[in-house]
């Protein structure tokens, strides 16, 4: 079973490398929509998830080696039509390919849920692209359901 711990600045190199791999998967699936992994990496500030009180960054380790990470934040969800709620938001979650389907993702997710609940969040949200069936199944198995259908048509 992996060890889940808070990320530190020393983890940033690994987190950026893993985020590159994650973004490359998105780019390969939708190259007309997603920027290249290199372009995305230039814009994503992972330090903020480590430094901010209302954010989280976790590392999954096996034998003292990072094998996955997750980042997100806790904030208020405000809308002109719905009640304001305190929510956790999973911004990125990634598990190295060799460790997928071994419980690492489940353990990372459990740490996120506990962290958000302990800080008063009443709901947990994430965005998943329609092509990412494994992520959709993963989150459905954890009890996440569709909140909004955001539809798109290429013109």
Image (spheres, rainbow, N blue to C red):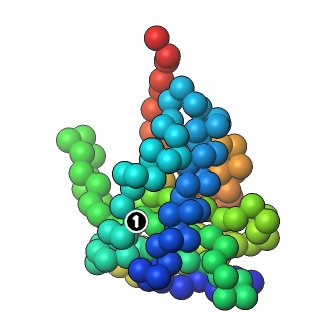
- For this view, does 119 lie left or right of residue 153? left
- Residue at coordinates 25% horizontally, 56% vertically from top-left? 84
- Residue at coordinates 60% horizontally, 46% vertically from top-left? 24
- For this view, does 106 lie left or right of residue 51? right
Residue 85 vertical position relative to residue 7 in the rendered view, above or below: above
Mark 1: secondary structure: loop
How far from the left and from the top, in percent, is residue 52? 29, 74
Residue 56 vertical position relative to residue 131 in the rendered view, above or below: below
Residue furthest left as drawn: 80
Give 98 or 120, whichever is nearer the viewer: 98
How far from the left and from the top, in percent, is residue 35? 48, 37
Give 1 or 86, whichever is nearer the viewer: 1
- Residue at coordinates 71% horizontally, 49% vertically from top-left? 134
Q: Which residue is mark 1?
A: 46
The quarter of the rendered structure image containing the N terminus is bottom right
How far from the left and from the top, in percent, is residue 17? 56, 63
> To which quarter of the image does residue 44 belong?
bottom left
How far from the left and from the top, in percent, is residue 148? 45, 39
Give 136 or 15, whichever is nearer the viewer: 15
- Residue at coordinates 54% horizontally, 85% vertically from top-left? 5
* Residue 124 visible, this orientation: no
- For this view, does 104 lie left or right of residue 83? right
């Amino acid at each position: 079973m992996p060890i889940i711990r808070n990320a530190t600045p020393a983890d940033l190199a690994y987190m950026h490398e893993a985020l590159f791999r994650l973004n490359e998967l998105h780019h390969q699936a939708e190259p007309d929509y997603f920027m290249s992994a290199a372009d995305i990496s230039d814009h994503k500030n992972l330090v903020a998830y480590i430094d901010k009180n209302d954010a989280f960054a976790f590392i999954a380790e096996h034998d003292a080696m990072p094998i996955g990470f997750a980042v997100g934040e806790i904030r208020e969800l405000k809308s002109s039509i719905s009640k304001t709620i305190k929510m956790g938001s999973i911004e990125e979650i990634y598990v190295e390919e060799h460790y997928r389907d071994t419980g690492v993702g489940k353990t990372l997710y459990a740490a996120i849920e506990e962290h958000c609940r302990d800080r008063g969040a009443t709901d947990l949200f994430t965005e998943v692209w329609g092509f990412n069936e494994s992520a959709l199944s993963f989150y459905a198995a954890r009890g996440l359901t569709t909140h909004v259908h955001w539809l798109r048509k290429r013109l």
